[in-house]
Image (cartoon, rainbow, N blue to C red):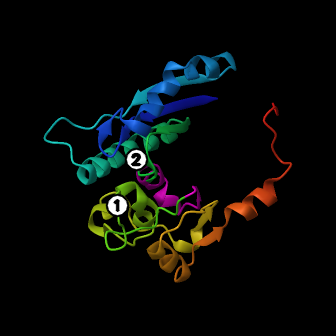
C-alpha cells in the first residue's frame, strides 16, 4: 500500500509546542521504518506555516488547513492512503475539506465536543471550535475558503464526549449531530479490543 504521511506539527499556531510536538515525535520514533518493514511504500511531508507575517492562531490555523487540504487531495489523487499526523483538532478542517466533494461522514472521537463558538467559548481556544466550524456554526467566511459547504449535521457522530460546556450542550440539543456518550461507547466496545491484540 502507498501511504502518505502528512505531519502538521502545530498547536495554537505555534510549531512544535505542546501537542504540536507529537507529529514529529512519531516520525522520530521510527514510524516510517515500521510501515516500510510491513511492505508499505511511504512518503512523508511536513506542512509548514508560511513565513509571510506574524503567526496568529486563527489566520495560521486556516492557512495550515488549506495547505493540508491540498496535500490530502494530492495523496488521494495519486492513489495513496493519506495519514495525517496532527498536533490539534483544527487539522480536521483541512482533512475533511479534502473529502468535502464526497459529502463525508465524520466520526468525531474526543472527550470534548469541540462545538464551542466565539460566543460560547470561555477560553477562546480555536481547537475547541473545530467541529462547530465544520458544521457551519462559526467562522463561516473563513470556513468557506476551505469547504464548499458545511458538513451536514446528520453526517456527524460525536463519540466519547464527556466534557461538554453549556454552550456545546445547547448546540447539540438543537442539532442533528448524534452523540454517543463515553460510557455507551465503552460498553459497546467492551471485549472488542485488548492491548495485546495483533
Which residue does the image show at 58% across and 68% down from the upper left?
A: 155
**On screen, 10 above or below 65?**
above
Q: Element at badge 1?
A: loop
Bounds of the magenta segment: 93-111
Q: In the picture provided, is 38 more to the left or to the right than 124?
A: right
**On screen, 83 above or below 91?**
above
Q: Residue pushed farthest bottom?
A: 174
Q: Where residue 23 sits: x, y (%)?
A: 47, 32
Residue at which label 2 appears: 69
Is the residue marked by circle 1 packed among few (<14), some (14-19), or many (20+) residues within 10 Å? few
Which mark lies nearer to you, 2 or 1? 1
The quarter in which the N terminus is drawn is top right
Along the viewing direction, whichever of 104 and 102 lies nearer the viewer: 104
Q: Is residue 117 magenta?
A: no
Which residue does the image show at 80% across and 59% down from the upper left?
A: 188
The quarter in which the C terminus is drawn is top right
Q: Where residue 4 sits: x, y (%)?
A: 51, 31
**On screen, 130 above or below 98?**
below
Amino acid at each position: 500500500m502507498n501511504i502518505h504521511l502528512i505531519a502538521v506539527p502545530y498547536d495554537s499556531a505555534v510549531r512544535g509546542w505542546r501537542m504540536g510536538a507529537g507529529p514529529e515525535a512519531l516520525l522520530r520514533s521510527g514510524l516510517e521504518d515500521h510501515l516500510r518493514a510491513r511492505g508499505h511504500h511511504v512518503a512523508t511531508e511536513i506542512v509548514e506555516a508560511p513565513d509571510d507575517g506574524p503567526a496568529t492562531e486563527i489566520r495560521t490555523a486556516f492557512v495550515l488547513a488549506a495547505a493540508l487540504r491540498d496535500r490530502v487531495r494530492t495523496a488521494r489523487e495519486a492513489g495513496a492512503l493519506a495519514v495525517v499526523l496532527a498536533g490539534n483538532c483544527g487539522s480536521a478542517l483541512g482533512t475533511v475539506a479534502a473529502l468535502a466533494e464526497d459529502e463525508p461522514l465524520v466520526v468525531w472521537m474526543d472527550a470534548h465536543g469541540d462545538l464551542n463558538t466565539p460566543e460560547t467559548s470561555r477560553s477562546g481556544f480555536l481547537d475547541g471550535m473545530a467541529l462547530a466550524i465544520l458544521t457551519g456554526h462559526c467562522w463561516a467566511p473563513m470556513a468557506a475558503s476551505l469547504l464548499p459547504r458545511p458538513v451536514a449535521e446528520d453526517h456527524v457522530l460525536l463519540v466519547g464526549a464527556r466534557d461538554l460546556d453549556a454552550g456545546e450542550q445547547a448546540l447539540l440539543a438543537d442539532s442533528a449531530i448524534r452523540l454517543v456518550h463515553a460510557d455507551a461507547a465503552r460498553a459497546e466496545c467492551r471485549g472488542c479490543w485488548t492491548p495485546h491484540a495483533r
